[in-house]
Image (spheres, helix red, strand yellow):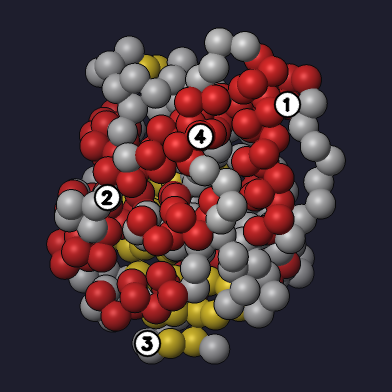
Amino acid sequence: MPSSALFADTPAFASHALPVPGGHVLSVQEYGCADGPAAVVLHGGPGSGCSPLLRRVFDPAHWRIVCPDQRGAGASRPRGGTANNGTAELLDDLEHIRARLGITRWVVVGGSWGAALALAHAAAAPQAVAALLLRASFLARPEDIAAFFGPLSLEQLAPELDAPDAATRERAALAWWRREQELAGTHAAEPRGEALAAQVERLRVQAHYLHHGCWLQSPTLLERCEAVPRVPVHLIHARDDRVCPPEGATLLQRRLRGATLQWLDNAGHDAAHPAMVAAMRSALERYAREGRFADGGEHA
C-alpha cells in the first residue's frame, strides 16, 4: 500500500452512547484492534464530527482507535447544541470517556481545533497522555480568529446562524462555507438541502466557540504548554495553510520541550492531501515501532 494511501475503512467493533452532564449524549466509536494501544482522535471545527478520514491514517491491525463526536457534533446529541458546551466540558468528557473505556493512557491525535483540544487535554490531564500527534495546529488567538473571517463578521454571522427563519440561517452558513473554501483552495459543490442544514448545525457550534475565544484565552494555549507532560510530541503543518497560520506550529515547538516539527509543501489545510496522509501514516507507524514519531529537531 502506498504511504499516501488511507487504510481501508473497517466497521466499529464497539459503539457507545455516553450521557454526560448538561444534557448531552456523546457518540463514541471504537475501531481497529480491541487489544491494541489506544489512540483518541479529536476532530476539528469545533462541531465538525469525527469523519472516517481521520481514523484511516491508523493501521487497524495495530491500534485501538477511539473516535468521539464532541458535544453538539456528528452523531452526538443534541446536534448543534451549544448549551453546556465549552472547552471545559469537552475536557471533562475526555476523562469520562477514558475512564468508561478502561484506558490508562492514550496517544492523542488531533488536527486544527482538534490539535488545540489535544494540547488542552494534555495540560489538564497529563497522566492520561502517552504522546501527541498534532496536524495543522490552531492556537485560538484573537488574531487567528480574525484572520480566518477576513471580510466576514463573526459578530454578524453568529446570531444569524441562530435566526428563527431557515433562509437567514442558510445564508449565513453559505457565506461561512464559501470563506472556508476560499482559504482551503477547494471548489466543492455548495451544500443544499439536508447537507446545508447540517452545515448550519456545525457552524452554530463553531461560532459559539470562536465567539468565546474557544475558552483558551486565560491561560492561553501557549501558556498551557508548560503543563504538557514530557512525552513524544510531533507537529505536522503545511507552509501554505491559510486556515491555521504556520506561525502557530513554530510557536508551539518552542514551547513544547522536545517537540518535533515537520513542514509540508502545498498541502494547505487539507487533511486528505496525499502529503498529509503520508506524513500522518509515517509518524504513527514509526511510533508503533519505536515509541517516537520522528528524530529530534525540526524536519524539513
Q: Is residue 234 left or right of residue 180?
A: left
What count of labels does the image hold? 4
- The residue to which callout 4 is attached is 156
Q: Amino acid at mark 3?
A: Gly
Which quarter of the rendering shows the C terminus?
bottom right
Q: Secondary structure at mark 1?
A: helix
Q: CA distance from mark 3 to mark 4?
A: 45 Å
Q: CA distance from mark 1 to mark 3?
A: 43 Å
Looking at the image, tell me whether mark 1 or mark 2 is earlier in sequence order.
1
265 or 257: nearer the viewer: 265
182 or 96: nearer the viewer: 182
The image shows residue 227 at horizontal and vertical percentages of 15, 62
Q: Amino acid at mark 1?
A: Ala
- The residue to which callout 3 is attached is 296
- The residue to which callout 1 is attached is 195
Q: Amino acid at mark 2?
A: Leu
Q: CA distance from mark 4 to mark 1?
A: 22 Å
Of circles 4 and 1, the one toward us is: 4
The image shows residue 58 at horizontal and vertical percentages of 57, 55
Residue 216, numbered circle: 2
